[in-house]
Image: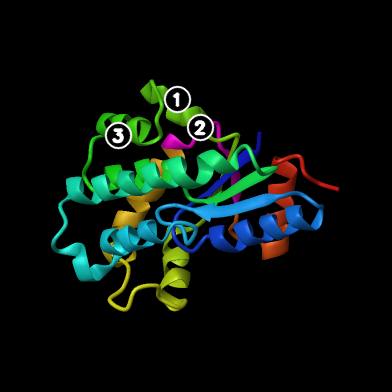
Amino acid sequence: MARYICLEGTEGVGKTTQTQKLVDYLKGRGFKVLQTKEPGTPLSPVTMKLREIMLSNEFDKDLTPAARELISQAIRSIHLGKVVGPALHNYDFVVQDRGILSGLAYGTACGNQTELLELLAAYASDLEQNHQIYQLYDDVLYLRGNVSKGLDRALSSKQEFKDGDAMESRGNEFLTQVGNNMDDISTRFKAKVIDVDGKDINAIFKNILSALNLEE
């Protein structure tokens, strides 16, 4: 059974960079690794189409908080059922950029109730009890950094959507709430917290390997 690792954090803290470094490191050691992400993975093209509807500013004004959340959960259901589930029996590691922690943090900041989000996440994940979502991953790494600086980095990088990202466009106040939510919810996942401010990429990666007990 694969070890299922999820990297979490707010915008611009380096999740994607560190996910790639971890995947490359594990592959370099001879492990079979599946690299994936939420919401939306290139491993499932339909989830990428749903991701655009969910996150592009082009559609933002047409979505209610409930509609956005239901799209998010549809993505999760497809991702876990069609991509991650089968991979757990065929790989040594599954390494994922974002997961349910982000879903809960952003979903509540968008105006949804935590209890409803837990129920929907459990249903989408094919779990019998809501609390099981907090045990879905073997390891959750929460990369924690300054929200304002992270947003600046995210906005200055190449934008995924031509009309901009709906979450990034909500600005510092919204993303600060998301960060506060992550601080709180991360404890339910027993997440390993890695503070990234003032550290370079390699130092953060060293912290990640240490947290996962993967140092050579």
User: Dot 3 lies on which element?
Assistant: helix
The residue sitting at 55% across, 50% down in the picture is: 96
* Residue occupying the far right of the picture: 216
* Mark closest to the chain's N terminus, 3 or 2: 3
Camera-side residue of 31 and 104: 31
The percent position of residue 10, horizontal first and vertical second, equals 45, 55
User: Dot 2 lies on which element?
Assistant: loop
Distance from label 2 to label 1 (Cα)?
Answer: 6 Å
The residue sitting at 32% across, 43% down in the picture is: 73
* Mark closest to the chain's N terminus, 1 or 3: 3
Camera-side residue of 182 and 33: 33
Q: Are marks 3 and 2 in contact (CB under 8 Å)?
A: no
In the picture shown, does residue 133 fall above or below 201?
A: above
Q: Are marks 2 and 1 in contact (CB under 8 Å)?
A: yes
Which residue position holds label 2? 136
Residue 193 magenta-highlighted: yes
